[in-house]
Amino acid sequence: MSVHFAIITAKKDLRRRLADPAALLIWLALPLAIGSLLVLINSGDGGAPRGRLLVVDEDRSFVSGVIAAIPARGEMAELFDVVHVEHAEGRRLIDADEATALLILPAGLQGAFVGKGNAEIRLVTNPSHRILPSVIEEAMSIAADFAVYSERLLGPAAPHFADMRLDDATASPSDIEESLSQLVRRLNSRLLESGKRVLAPPVLSVELAPAPDESESSGESAVPDIGRIFLPGMIFLSVLFVAQGMSGDVWNERRLGTLHRVACSPPSMAAFLAGKLLAGTSVAALVAVIGVAAGIVLFDLSLSRAPLAVLWVAFSGCVMLVYFVLLQCLASSQRAGDMLSNLVLFPVLMLGGSFFPFQMMPDWMAEIGRWTPNGAALIRLGEILDAQPDFPAMALAALAIGVPAAVAFALATRRLSGRFLVS
């Protein structure tokens, strides 16, 4: 009798949900919209910011050429267009807001490098640019540290830099590298002699070996798609919205007199609440089907992962609904219940990995989030979608979130039969 009554209650709730498709679509579409925005924000498709660096090389030496070539090499070359200018022109462009920064390499820089006099590298940044000037500042700071340690390492060989010049102040980075290689060959014997106390006898033997190709061993890309990382969180975002929205239905049942009729009829209040949980579990399963289907289409997830993922999300949705129903039962009014559930919902979403994956959180926040009910369930869902389900860990997580949910179910049933009914 109780099972039959629970099924009838579930059918009644599902028919009511289908009669209001707008609310159901909002529950499903809002997380998808948020997830799409988050993926777009974090995908980097818009490209990195690019700046214009003006270089005034008044020393026209080997050292100044090396420093000027730093922003034109490696990853910094993707951030800056390096332009060599005269001092007056550089000042005019930076004042006209036509450049990100102006780097001035003064005369005597190479002499200062080998201990002959002093020189000050000046960097004038554009105050309207925030990120790129700090990149240049950090690069120049590293260059200064490198110069200090290089001078110490070269020792007696350092003065050989003093007379070295570049034929062209705007020499290309390849020219700089060629000049540097020539210098290394010239100073090889001197450098080894001056550094013998440090370098010999060798105390370490280093053997370089190619790193294993993790992508080949796992059969998948070593760098997962950003949307794939967000997928489990977006599924649980929908599930939590569904749980929070359907939990408030107990107030409608009281207003319509359904709770009073159940309290006066043979079926128990537990069967009635079980029916509502069954309806909520069905909606959570629908969310899982849509989410996993999107993963199969967009991220090439294996179809074999779908059944276990849907079952896990449905179970987790049932657990979340129990928690939110208990919160509603503890409130003094429907408005207070909605406020209380919202106060719990958004911190849980933030900490539990629904807004941002645990990989993108600070370590301390991710550690807390993994202990939340939705965080613990989300981790297991991620393992299922990665085709690496840890069944003992899943069983432990099911107990960790299921046992408190059973207690919450008992408390909510008692509350619905008592003070909630007459308050």
Image (tube, helix red, strand yellow):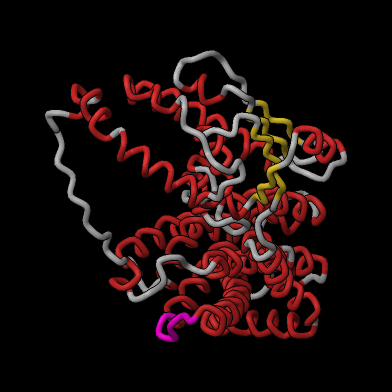
Residue 222 makes an appearance in the image: yes
Seen from the viewer's position, the closer of residues 193 and 73 is 193
* Residue at position x 87%, y 40% in the image: 96
Q: Quadrant of residue 114?
A: top left
- Residue shown at 59%/19% (left/top)? 119
Instruction: Please state if 60 lies on the left or on the right of 367 as rendered.
Output: right
Name the residue rendered at 48%, 60% in the picture.
Answer: 406
Q: How many marks?
A: 0
Observer able to see residue 1? no
Q: Residue 329, image x and y in percent?
A: 68, 55
Residue at 58% x, 83% y: name it.
Answer: 7
Left or right: residue 216 compared with residue 243: left
Residue lying furthest right: 96
| Magenta span | 300-305
Q: Position of residue 225 (x, y in %)?
A: 52, 69
Q: Position of residue 23 (x, y in %)?
A: 78, 75
